[in-house]
Amino acid sequence: MISGIINVKKEAGMTSHDVVFRLRKILHEKKIGHGGTLDPDVTGVLPIAVGKATRLIEYMQEEGKIYEGEITLGFSTTTEDASGEVVETTPIEEDLSEEQVDRVMAAFVGQITQVPPMYSAVKVNGRKLYEYARAGEEVERPERQVVIYSFERTSPLQFEDGLVRFGFQVKCSKGTYVRTLAVDLGKKLGYASHMSKLVRTSASGLEIQDAVTLSEIAQKVEEGNWEFLLPIEFGLGTLPRVLLNEEQGQDILYGRFIALPDVADDWVAAFRADQLIAILEKREELYKPRKVFL
């Protein structure tokens, strides 16, 4: 079995599941999962876990993400992005200023409440929201708390045919719907809006400049070049790390509890030398192995 992390550069038109399906064929490995869904129209970093690394997916998803894209003010869509049908139009007045946009964007920084879009995979009463949407049904959607670390405009306002477009960058927690952020920004400004472009440039500590496409991976595998497969340690995200001595390492491998008097975190990644051997969970004053990787 092969194990590791792959920094995939997802292309438009594919679901995250499509990427996993393709990789299973390319790598001849069934045990593959992704560390954070990307909508089909969104491109960029899709962290992939292979083999033993799939046990780290929950920690990969905890780390924040960075997106760059474009917001269009002037009309909204059913899907909150450029792929949907127009549902509302509000022509933009020429007196909209960059200072006004920047001030409203800054107000979103911090913990905010979002309502997931109808065209999303969030489940309500056992059905995905997009299934209700495709059937023309409305359903009450659960609110969620997310964190926006930064939300900034990255280009001048571009006025054209009653619309305004501008680039942005957002750093946010897991579970954030950037589409919804674009729509809510428009509402605060008094206009219908949608997210017209989006690229994920960073996720789980992986950067877009280091990402590889599926075709590049297929070619490398054919050549016997596996440099794209990163060590499973890349899947730890921001989980604190501790170095165990030989005796502590043996105790963990036997499933025993150990004391780590200088550690206060509830969850830690335990290493022996340079090798990850386990994820430890704190129980009262001792640590027990939750997941062992040897």
Image (cartoon, grey):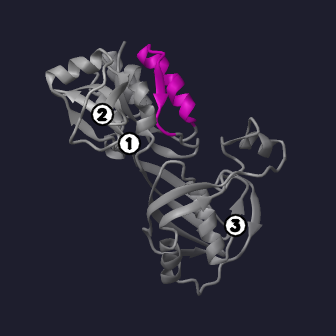
Q: Residues within 10 Å of mark 1 (few under 14, many from 20)?
A: many
- Name the side, left or right, on which 237 lies relative to 126: left
Q: Closer to us: mark 1 or mark 2?
A: 2
Q: Amino acid at mark 3?
A: Phe
- Disc 2 crowd rating (10 Å Cα; few below 14, some 14-19, many 20+) is many
Q: Which residue is mark 3?
A: 75
Given contact means CB atoms under 8 Å apart, are the residues at marks 1 and 2 in contact? no
Q: In front of the other: label 1 or label 3?
A: 1
Horizontal relation, residue 149 to residue 254: left or right: right
Contact check, label 3 and label 2, Cβ < 8 Å: no
Q: Which element is circle 3 on?
A: strand
Instruction: Mark yes or no: residue 191 visible.
Output: yes
Q: Residue tagged by mark 2?
A: 269
Q: Quadrant of residue 91?
A: bottom right
Above-or-below relation of 72 to 24: below
Query: Is residue 68 shown left or right of residue 138?
Result: left
The answer to whether residue 230 is seen in the rendering is no
- Residue 96 lies in what quarter of the image? bottom right
Q: Which residues are magenta?
A: 14-36
Q: Position of residue 14 (x, y in %)?
A: 56, 35
Whichever of labels 1 and 2 marks the residue nearer the N terminus, that label is: 1
